[in-house]
Amino acid sequence: MTKPQKFIGRSVPRLEDRTLLTGKGRFAADVSFPGQWTMRVVRSPIAHGKIRAIDTSAALAMPGVHAVWTFADVAHIPPIGFRLTGLKTLEPYRQHVLANDVVRYVGEPVAVVFAQDQYAAEDAADAVELDIEQLDAVMQAIDEPGAFAPGLNTEPDVVRKSYGDVDAAFRDAHAVVALELAVGRHTGVPMETRGAIARYDETRDVLEMHGAAKVPHWNRANLATMLGRLLDSVQLYEGHVGGGFGIRGELYPEDVLVCAAALHFKKPIKWIEDRREHLIAANHSRNQTHRIRAAIDKDGHILGIDNEFFHDNGAYMRTHAATVPDLTAAMLPGPYRVPAYRATGHIRLTNKTPCGTYRAPGRYESTFARERLMDAIAAKVGVDKVEIRRRNLISKSAMPYTLGLETLGTHIVYDSGDYALLLDKALKAAGWDELQAQLNARRAKGEKVGAGVAMFVEKSGLGPFDTVRVTVKPEGIEVVTGVASIGQGVETVIAQICADTLGVDYSGIKVIHGQTDRIARGMGAFASRVTVMCGEATRLAATKLRAQALEVAATLMQTSAAALDIIDGEIVRIDGAGPSMTLAALAQQVPDGLSVEDTFESTHMVYPYGVHVAAVKVDAETGSVTIERYLMAYDIGKAVNPKLVEGQIVGGLAQGLGGALYEEFLYDEAGEPLSVTFADYLMPTAREVPSSTVLLTEDAPSPLNPLGLKGAGEGGTNPVGAVIASAIDDALQRPGTVTQLPITPMRLKALIAAR
Amino acid sequence: MSEKIELTLNINGRDHAIKVEPRRTLADAIREDCGQTGTHIGCEHGVCGACTVIVDGAPVRSCLMFAGQAEGKTIRTVEGLAKGDDLHPMQQAFIDHHGLQCGFCTPGFLMLAVGVLEREPNISDEDLIDVLSSNLCRCTGYQNIIKAVRAAAQEMRK
């Protein structure tokens, strides 16, 4: 008899593509309702100031303008709460949906205009007159804290994590290596700007918000609380989402404002952000300075690491609260054995755009710090940078490895891994030894060429749960989940897992996500969690559904369930004899239909890991960096769809390169943002992103779920700043040269000249 | 606000009679007044290329053109690429090479690539990368877009 077709592990085409390629996608700006009003936000042009007056009369007198709101109109709405890592101490620093008496960054919403269309709304917003008394701005997180509000300074808290006897490690050290390192302010910048469309259905007493993303259920619960409504009377709908990267889909002031206005005016309210707004108002990220020291023995073994860092969170604490500094502190040790460790992370507020997570949050930063430190240790001891890493790697036999730190409410236990094996494979695939010979020969001729290596441990599959409902419908199988899609291929991957488990074709499975009226709860899409958590929940639900279906079919087909199989949606006898029936036909004979809901719970994250190798050429004249070779080795545990995993990794590399070489939000001393268009916030194009090689391995499946899954989303981004810095040092033959990202041409020329 | 003007836009072979302010961009007119929302707006200052459409045979940024300037011209958008259920070779190549993730920049890349290849079917690989570097994508890292466009170029030459 024929064997069931397998889908897990195959690079099948995406189910999402056809709709998106034919212009039938439904992104936020594509959603419109009859009679809708357009909302336009009036933003502070001052980085820090006291609001003396807001004159809305001229705006209100303009044609097509319906209303203008200031703080007084929304004073009853509480500030936006914390989704993750919310510390009590941070609460006074939360952001109100409109500024009250003080503005704290350029771009802060101070008023909103409601008008008949976008053009009228923008004209009117320009006519709102702001009288703001300028105050001194705090622009550097490493400076002494300043005043935030009476009785509150700009250091709301300090993240402290440690284990082992750090002081003893430094006392007994053969040598100490100390560095000061900085990562620039940059962020996700999805190609679709933010957007939200709210409408209130009076007859059903339901408030709807369209344009939801990332975490619809959490946002729904918080919108309901903030607006004083019952949970069931608020529904969020995710359409297509034009990229997420951590920043899109968090609950922002504008989301709350469209909902409040839809309730108040009983009109659909549409808000679509423009690009300048996006660059000054959506979450920024990454801005950290590390003062890091390692105590080492004579062979370069790490005895202890002391990591003090300053996290510039911008003007307010948004939904991520202490998440980024917490992850920075917790993930810094990475793949190395660090017997004693102490992190002291100063959470500092400045008069810049507030911050949140961006792809590989806290890891892009901590990997840069740790891998710079490893290179410095190698230079100090006088051994090769590969050798110093080998000496310090956690061995395979130590797995599972309890780090002794916590983050995101979980204990960090590296579930599986063979770091040394992946390093060997990566170097071999990159042709490391020949590469060294070639680079030496070229350097002897005067070229500035060099290679770098960086290692990292990622985290993924954050719980605590995901729930999935699988239903057999006449037209096919439906999977409903509370996760979300930000473009990464959720529908395809979940369909593959469901198809394999049930015994049907993946292309007939419809995966519904991000709709709060379709499933009671859901965690959304972040922390590379969807394939792990939702994937396993899908496998559980589909397994039960399959068993149920075979039980029912066995009775109808007068045999035992064990004698049956499901092949391509057809229930057949394993011996090939007798009649068969389709799953869909079977479902119609069951009074309640065939539908199973199940939940996967997990209290531990899973930890993929990787190695990046880069070879670069530096042009001393222009300060530009050309990437000549780039290899990414990544152990994913089990790849459901290798092509999509590679897509994640290669896409992640482009964003990592942005932060390493090009992208930075700059401000002048008064807090005026200087990077407000794509002409001054430089994202890599097809010219800058090199062709690269992905070496995907499955040597360390996770023991925490039966398929062995780990996440794919962030391993392409995590070590890019670190490896490019390492390669540039090598090209210049000056270890420790790069201490700051991004390595712009101007900075690189200055470094070369400083010799 | 200024007086509205009446004009006709020919999109994918169909005339749309619309009444818009003279300052209305072509991108807004295509999306809002003609209901063709496959063309996306990513920056409104001519850098990202998400709004790229083909006007009289040449790829243009529809956010940098007024609707009035497109009157009497032939406009092609992503909605016009497939012939019924048959995808354009460029669309098929994007599926085959995983050339899209979130899909927001994709219509702009499709129209850019189709527009250029129709004018220059034998464009060199180097020149092609120059062309593709005029649009931004934030998901794919471009490599699969480049592969897809090269594959489609071969197919389109057949």
Image: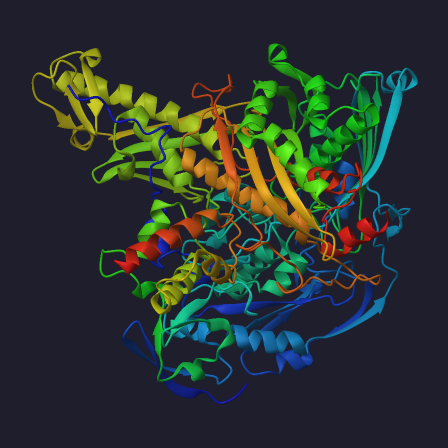
Can you name the residue that lies furthest to the top here?
A397
Against B11, residue A333 (above or below) is above
Residue A16 placement, left or right of B63: left
Q: Where's residue A228, x and y in %? A: 59, 49
Q: Is residue A405 visible?
A: no
Q: Coloured how?
A: rainbow
The answer to which image quadrant residue A580 occupies is: top left
Decide if residue A292 is in sight here: yes
Q: Is residue A212 left or right of residue B113?
A: right
A339 or A58: nearer the viewer: A339
Quadrant including the N terminus of chain A: top left
Q: Which residue does the image show at 71% across and 41% down from the upper left?
A: A443
Instruction: Report the front residue among B143 and A209.
Output: B143
Q: Along the horizontal axis of the image, is B97 left or right of A342?
A: left
**Observer-nearest residue: A246 or A303?**
A303
Q: Based on the displayed image, in which of its 4 quarters is residue A545 positioned? A: top left
Q: Furthest residue to the left?
A: A578
- Vertical position of residue A452 compared to residue A251: above or below: above
Q: Position of residue A359 (x, y in %)?
A: 60, 42
Tell me what residue is drawn at x 28 percent, y 22 percent: A546
Q: Residue B68: horizontal and vertical position, in percent?
A: 44, 84
**Relative to residue A283, is residue A52 depicted above or below?**
below
User: Is A513 on the left-hand or right-hand side of A307?
Assistant: left
Count of picture labels: 0
Q: Residue A392, position in %: x, y?
A: 72, 19
